[in-house]
Image: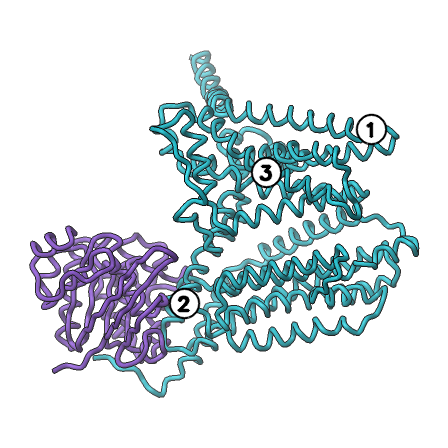
Chain colours: A purple, B cyan
Amino acid sequence: MSEPVLVATEVTKSYGDLVALHPMDLTVLAGQMVALVGHNGSGKSTFLKLASGLLDMSGGEITVAGSPAGSAEARAAVSYLPDDPVLYDDLSVREHLAYVAALHGAERTEEELDALIGKVGLSHRADDLPARFSRGLRQKASIALGLVRPFELLLVDEPFVGLDAPGKEALLGVLDDLHRAGASVVVATHDPSFVERVERCVALRDGEVVHDGPATAADVLRLVGA
Amino acid sequence: MLTANPEADLEAALADWRKFRRRKRLADIHWIDAAYQAYLTAVVGGAIFGVASGFIGDNELSPEAVARLLRHADAWVGMVAALVIGVGLRSGSRGGPVALERAEVRHVLLAPVDRTTALLGPALRQARFLFFVGIVGGAMAGFLASQRLPGSPGQWFAVGALAGATLVGLSVGAAHLANGIGIPRWVGSLLSVILVGLAIADGLGAGVPSPTAAFGRLALWPVRFDGWGVAPIVVAVVLMGIGLRLVGNTPLEAAERRSTLVGQLRFAATLQDVRTVLVLRRQLAMELPRLRPWFTVRVKGTGRSPVFVRGLRGVLRWPAARVARMGLLAVVAGGALRAVWAGTTPMILLAGAAAFVAALDAVEPLAQEVDHPSRRDSIPMESGELHLRHVPIAVLVMVLFGIVAAVMAGVPGPGQVPGDVASLLALPLACGGVGGALVSVLGGPPSSSDTWNLVPPEVAGMRLAFRTAWPPAIAILGAVPVLLARTVLNKHQPATSGASVGSMGVLALFVLVAGWVRVRARIGEWWQTQMSMAKQLPANTADDNERDEA
């Protein structure tokens, strides 16, 4: 049996009186691709941010590759792709990739960077400033940043928002490649069709897990009305 | 799969990339822009210094006056330190004082780089800038003090610079320490209130020792050397040392929130957009409306005054921090009124400023209509009418503010305003504040709109300056009755007559402002029409010429 990469135990998140995530347990094994589905405000993004270390837990525990979420070891193991691309104003796409790779100790050649830029469809804009890109192009740059560094677990939040059809197909291909290469991937999405590509679907409703297992698009619509 | 090089020096890579980015940024700055910025800073700094110098005057105080001033001066100067340390504690308990770029939070702090190393550079750069501001500001304050107080200008200059640097060290160090040990937000606020409260009690001679009085003793070294003045310097050094060692404990959640809001806040401040600054500052302080109101207002059906009830419901959801701030501002305004009554005329600016800031909170229901014009315009009512219906709740809130300020002004003690005069000050103070806030919120940030493109630049510049200064000036006019009362009393006439006349004047001004609120949309439409007609005029003239030639 595969080793667990992500283990969440009784994880909660509250903002004052508002409970964003009820006590939640979730284990993701090495090499698993998981779809995290739910309606707006169900706690998908909150959970991914907690696992990446971007948010502080109100209670419970999350470990990533055996280390507490947010620790240096966990940060080295998890790559988080946010739904809102956050990029520097003064660095080109290529410089962004080189910077993030360096911060993670990944030695990438120019050819490797070019190949990654080509994979997300930004070859013609590699030396432009992504801060001036459209939403979709910034999303592509953000995807490249998530992939340029080593990781054991990829957390992806609403990756298809803002992408055109070729961009979406390219991203799905990249996720499949990563899955085949043995990476664990958790994708939070509103897209019910995505669940049919994965072996496991976790559905959240108002901060609680209401389904964990294989699912069809129809199941998702019935479970969470996404 | 890709693997990381375990021997890679991530911190060195971060330092190299930061150097690269700094070089890129510097290369993008033209020396003329930099020189122009320095020129503007020097002009503004010189103007502030000149105005402050004019207010303070240059007649040296008599020995009796100096002795009277020194009786509680250390406590009052210490109150400045208490306020500044309080700001630091509140900032630190909310993830401050460092505000990184959002991309730095996402890409650097989420990388396996040592966080202390990653944050130390930005923290030191911020501290270096603040120390520079503190030293220059302190030296200028010291120089101004040397005009009235005994001691050579050189001594005052040096001690002022030392005190300014110490103040920055105390505040920034307290912020880093509060952030590093992760004190809860309410503890940060409570400690701030205690420090300020102790300083006020000490200043009023209540016999309560204030820890920040030691800072006052340092600042007053040119008049009277006191060994206790060394204490705040030592504390500042210790706080900075420990605080910077703990900078790596900054919670990412707070860093992310600050990175987003502080950037917007700086931009809004650059545009002099008071409303946006206020809203963002609330978000930064996590000042959220209460989920449950202080008490519930029950109205049958839609009620007869839905706009007023909506405003009342909003006010009843004010968080405790906002209520406390209103109370504190009222106390400050009352204290300033006392000082004006006692003869320190410039304190009228402080009283007006306190009322203005408080009123910006009081007009919140109206401001939300301005923030969401499409929602407002969907209501079948003229916008001016809707805005006007929001005014009574703002006046109600500010009358409570004015009553607290008047009570504070009338409390027995030095500078006490007589009760009959104080009771006449509450309403004008409230109306002045609301009037200023209404003009500020409805007028929006000063801008050079298209309709003003035709006027000469000099006129447009004057209009810009007027629009910036007018709202706080209205609030300051609300505090003028106390000045008139004092002037009339000095002419051996009843002080209440002066206060009454002043109050009537302020109320008349408030009525004019309310009228402007009601008809400003119509005036705006008329003005737009006139300007568009004026723009079309040259084109018509050219057509006419062509016709004539044909």
- Residue B23, percent from left and from top: 50, 68
Q: Earlier in the sequence, mark 3 or mark 2?
A: 2
Q: Amino acid at mark 1?
A: Pro
Q: Which residue is mark 2?
A: B252
Q: Which residue is mark 1?
A: B494
- Label 2 neighbour load within 10 Å: few <14, some 14-19, many 20+: some
- Label 1 neighbour load within 10 Å: few <14, some 14-19, many 20+: some
Looking at the image, is B402 positioned above or below residue B526? Answer: below
Looking at the image, is A218 positioned above or below residue B112? Answer: above
Q: Residue at x 83, y 30 (%)?
A: B488
Quarter of the image where the C terminus of chain B is located: top left
Question: Which residue is outermost to the right?
Answer: B63
**Are marks 3 and 1 in one subunit?**
yes
Residue B462: tell me if it is visible. Answer: no
- Residue A213, percent from left and from top: 10, 66
Residue B514 sits in quarter: top right
